[in-house]
Image (cartoon, helix red, strand yellow):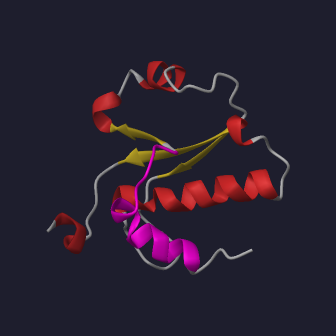
């Protein structure tokens, strides 16, 4: 199993390799509506949320929402090694913005 630094490399390019939604994104504008947003996810029997804000990604620093790759990768580990059903695990990114000037430009 390859994890670090492979996941870190993917996170840095996540917005360039995006194919389909594999996670849920929540922003500060969603305050007071998070339960409704979670209910809107297609899988109705979630057992585990893997949450990140993308600010401290494996020595890479603040990757903002691109840090979701870490939560997705951890979800894969929970399913492949922990025996969780993939439908029961939801990666979530709480978008709190970024201080990463490269991403802001």
Task: Tell me if 62 is positioned left or right of 84 in this view.
Answer: left
- Whether residue 100 is situated above or below residue 42 in the rendered picture: below
Q: Position of residue 79 (x, y in %)?
A: 76, 51
Q: Residue at x 50, y 74 (%)?
A: 8
Quadrant of the image for the C terminus? Answer: bottom left
Quadrant in the picture for residue 64? bottom left
Question: Which residue reaches farthest front?
Answer: 19
Given residues 97 and 77, the one toward you in this image is 77
- Rendered position, 25 above or below 13: above
Q: Within the magenta stretch, is there residue 98? A: no
Number of numbered discs: 0
> Residue placed at 65% from the left, 74% from the top?
3
Residue range of the region highlighted in magenta in the rendering: 6-22
Where is residue 14 drawn, in percent x and y?
40, 63
| Residue 64 horizontal side relative to residue 44, left or right | left
Rendered view: 62 above or below 29: below
Q: Closest to the observer: 9 or 48?
A: 9
Q: Is residue 6 above or below residue 92?
A: below
Q: Name the residue at 73% across, 33% down.
A: 47
Image position, residue 37 (x, y; %)? 45, 24
Which residue is located at x 66 percent, y 52 percent?
Answer: 75
């Amino acid at each position: 199993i390859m994890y670090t630094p492979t996941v870190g490399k993917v996170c840095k390019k996540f917005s360039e390799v995006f194919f389909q939604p594999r996670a849920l994104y929540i922003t500060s504008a969603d305050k007071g509506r998070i339960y409704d947003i979670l209910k809107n996810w297609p899988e109705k029997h979630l057992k585990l949320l893997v949450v990140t804000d993308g600010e401290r990604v494996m020595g890479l620093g603040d990757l903002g929402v691109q840090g979701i790759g870490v939560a997705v990768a951890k979800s894969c580990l929970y399913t492949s090694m922990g025996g969780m059903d993939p439908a029961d695990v939801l990666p979530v990114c709480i978008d709190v913005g970024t201080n990463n000037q490269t991403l802001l430009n």
